[in-house]
Image (tube, rainbow, N blue to C red):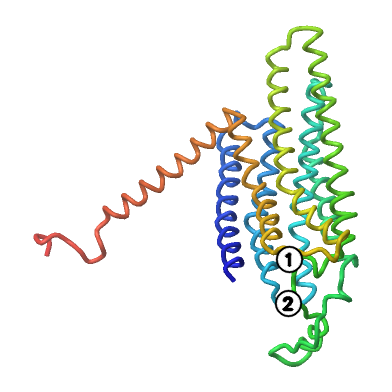
Amino acid sequence: MDLYLGFIILEGLLALAVVGTNLLVCAALCLHRELRSVTNCLVACLALADLGVGALAIPFSVVLSLELTLCFYTCLFLACFPLVTTQFSILLLLLIALNAHLKIRLPSRKGRVLGAVGLCWLLSLLIGLSPMMGWNRLGHYVEGNWTLPYGGFLSKLHDDHLGRCSFTSVFAPEYLVYFVFFACTLLPLGALLGIYADLFRLVRGHFIAQPLRAAKRGELHMARTLLLLLGIFCLCWIPLHVVYCVQLLCPGCRSYAALDRLAVLLSHLNSLANPLVYAMRKKDFGRALRSVLLRYLDLNAAWWAGAAAEPAPGAGTLGER
């Protein structure tokens, strides 16, 4: 019980931090027009995905960790939503890398970034919601004959679909390892590493041929920042996938609940690390975030000062009375 309580408290605090930080990112781009470059707009889309993690995916994960008795399809939706946000983040990182690569190789090119973001979102929905199309463990989910506290048609509809809800109870281990990890995570990450390797080779070639212009130096700094984001993503998400691989390849191995919870918590930490790392590496972006935060704090302070100075209803000076 102490483990569950500590996990829930940490997840709640992390969800608040993720939502607040990524809202600051979106507000900074809305209020500061000078930051509205293509790369920053893609980072804002990544912040929106992380906002979905803090607002919905983390609460859903807490519900899944409690292993409550739920209808199978409710549990399946709760488990699918984190897959959608994660896949959208991976595809956005790939899109950001492609954009950075093309800005150096083809500086004069113009692309339709909004359409590419829409395509990433569509692919994320198809991949994340694929278990709802049949690739699930409905046959293994139901445990015993559960009876709902109400009767009638709804009771007959749901009685056969009740079970203990968890992430692994609705997804087959083969789905989590072979499809989600190998096909939908490792392949894009491998493509990302290849893109960044070619990008740094290209920049190095420019540097040897002629002195690197200031614009190229800026793109090189941006590429290093994006590569750092990729490294943090791998550091945060690979441990959770390793847990799933061990569960599939070594079903008789002993599992530790604390390690499982830590891996889940670490994966959610990525949504907080993205905007912080980007703000620290991009000085203008960091200054914009600080200005938005200070403006919000000043408005709150002014509101509280006004509320404290306003007399209570019915109150007045002695002379007025």
The image shows residue 36, relative to residue 18, as above or below, that is above
Label 1 vs label 2: CA separation? 11 Å
* Nearer-the-camera pick, 159 or 123: 159
Does 26 sit left or right of 114 as displayed?
Answer: left
Q: Residue at x 43, y 44 (%)?
A: 297
- Characterize the local packing of mark 1: few (<14), some (14-19) or many (20 or more) Cα atoms within 10 angstroms: many
Identity, as a three-letter code, of the amino acid under mark 2: Leu
Does 160 sit left or right of 306 as displayed?
Answer: right
- The residue furthest top is 210
Q: How far from the left and from the top, in percent, is residue 308?
A: 29, 54
Which corner quadrant of the image does residue 280 belong to? Answer: top right
* Residue matched to label 1: 78
Mark 1–mark 2 contact, CB under 8 Å?
yes
* Nearer-the-camera pick, 94 or 118: 94
The numbered dot on residue 296 is none
- Characterize the local packing of mark 2: few (<14), some (14-19) or many (20 or more) Cα atoms within 10 angstroms: some
Q: Residue at x 89, y 76 (%)?
A: 139
Which corner quadrant of the image does residue 90 belong to? Answer: top right
- The residue furthest bottom is 151
The numbered dot on residue 70 is 2
Q: How far from the left and from the top, in percent, is residue 41?
A: 69, 37
Under tag 1, what secondary structure?
Answer: helix
Does 67 sit left or right of 283 as displayed?
Answer: right
